[in-house]
Image (cartoon, helix red, strand yellow):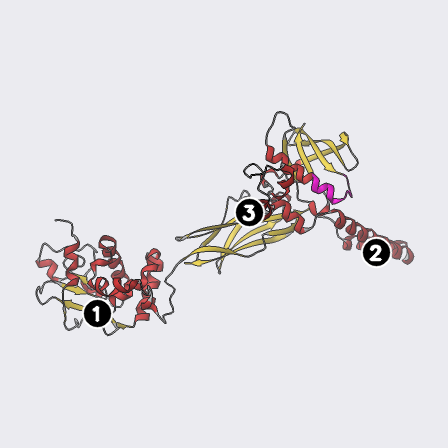
Amino acid sequence: MPVPGLLPVLHLAFVFISVALLPSVSGKILTRCEFATKLHDELAVTNPKAWDQLGDWVCIVEGSDRKINTSLFLQSPNNPSSKNYGVFRINNQWWCQDESSHVNPDFTNLCNVTCADLQDEDLSDDIRCALEIEKRHNFTAWAAWTTSCKTKKDLDEYRFLDNCSVTPQPSVPVIIGEDLNFMFTEGESDKYIDCRANGTPAPNVSWEQIAFPELTFHNLAGPVSRLIFPKVKSYYNRSFTCVAENFRGKASQTYYLHVKSAEPGPESSADGAITYGLAIGLPLLILAGFAASAFYYFRRILLKLNGLSGAEIREFLQGDPERLKQAGGDGRDSGQARPLHENIHYQPYNKEFDIPKGKLSCDKTRILGEGQYGFVTMAEMEGVSVAVKAVKPHTDKMYIKALLIELKIMIYLGKNPNIVGLIGAVTNELDRGKHVHVADL
């Protein structure tokens, strides 16, 4: 049997007369908005890419009285065996099966549906068949679209959806939220990072390339994907990437987790002082409490003075793309070549060089070199001897920043036989004024 071409489909272009609805058919008269809502909901499941054609479908099925009859039955006065069924006026000669199909062997049933099923209130089979027709012959298979919809489409694409509470136009996902940096303390429990996204249809939100099997994520309403940390560990000090995706496109966002080392708070020291004081008397208790408070007070001030602020840490990790662009990148592609060190602090830090603090075992008795503000010592990392360069305690943070610039330069230069090979760095305690480079020995 030959494959149907466009001309047989254009039976829909002939003038039909309405006849009485079959008594066994249970149909319904729909308004424009009722039909648009049913079609919108069905396409969201079966074919979301057709959402941006919602106005065309409404134009095709709407009659001159602006009512849409799910039980519609039309018969050609010139060819009584040619009949159209349902809201999409689907023809029995090619697309559905009725009593005429059993008599005429030339009739086909390309949608694999009975014509009677196209006249009930369930529009799922009607929509499936209409999409098949449009896939083979475009909207020109319907005379109504050629004469009434195509010519007006450029004037107002969605005029047939005015005042209807449907959103026909899908959109690319967008991840929302400005806080990209999170600070957790080692040992904390049940911490999490939420990634929230918008888009039509609602995107699928997930986290990619999670290197730690103990970490899981759960999808919440919103849509939101929550990355859960059952217990915070030092080696979580790294970046995590969230991805939101629907059929329109994909968006991603990187979040940075900074893990602080756990340290005893003033409360634990105060408890010890009280116990000791009760044992030796009230005067010593008061003195011990005062000494402990003063110690932690000045210690925190000192750490605050020497440690990097949150903004300074973000600038080190993320760089400053706008100022880097204004400065001409690294000078190689700009008209005026500029020394690398003048722009390197605007470059983002490559987190692949981060080393968990627990992997290093330093031997401060084996000093290799020392200056006024820093020193180099021997260390072991996974059974291999390495060199560790660090700033001295309570060093002004300007020297820490200088060491961070040196780190970025070494990363940028890569492997070179004339330069000591960089292995990585420990950067999770910058807020406490601590930082080390790890290099080949």
Mark 1 is surrounded, within 10 Å at the Cα level, by few (under 14), some (14 to 19) or many (20 or more) other residues, namely: many
Name which quarter of the figure residue 153 lies in: bottom left
Which segment did they paint magenta? 392-402
**Eye-nearest disc, 2 or 1:** 1
The residue type indicated by label 3 comes to: Phe
Mark 3 is surrounded, within 10 Å at the Cα level, by few (under 14), some (14 to 19) or many (20 or more) other residues, namely: some
Residue 214 x, y percent position in the rendering? 55, 46
The residue at which mark 3 appears reads as 240
Nearer-the-camera pick, 213 or 314: 314
Residue 55 x, y percent position in the rendering? 31, 64
In magenta stretch: residue 49: no
Which residue shows up at 23% across the image and 63% down it? 145
Q: Earlier in the sequence, mark 2 or mark 3?
A: 3
On screen, residue 384 versus residue 44, left or right, reads right
Which residue shows up at 24% across the image and 66% down it? 61
The residue sitting at the top extreme is 417
| Label pair 2/3, CB-CB below 8 angstroms | no
Name which quarter of the figure residue 90 lies in: bottom left
The residue type indicated by label 2 comes to: Ile
The residue type indicated by label 1 comes to: Ser
On screen, residue 27 versus residue 330, left or right, reads left
On screen, residue 430 versus residue 288, left or right, reads left
- Answer whether residue 245 is visible to the viewer in this image: yes
The residue at which mark 2 appears reads as 274
Q: Secondary structure at mark 2?
A: helix
> Residue 71: which disc?
1
Name which quarter of the figure residue 76 lies in: bottom left
As drawn, 177 above or below 350: below
- Mark 2 → mark 1, Cα distance in angstroms: 86 Å
Q: Which image quarter is the C terminus in?
A: top right
- Answer whether residue 358 is visible to the viewer in this image: no
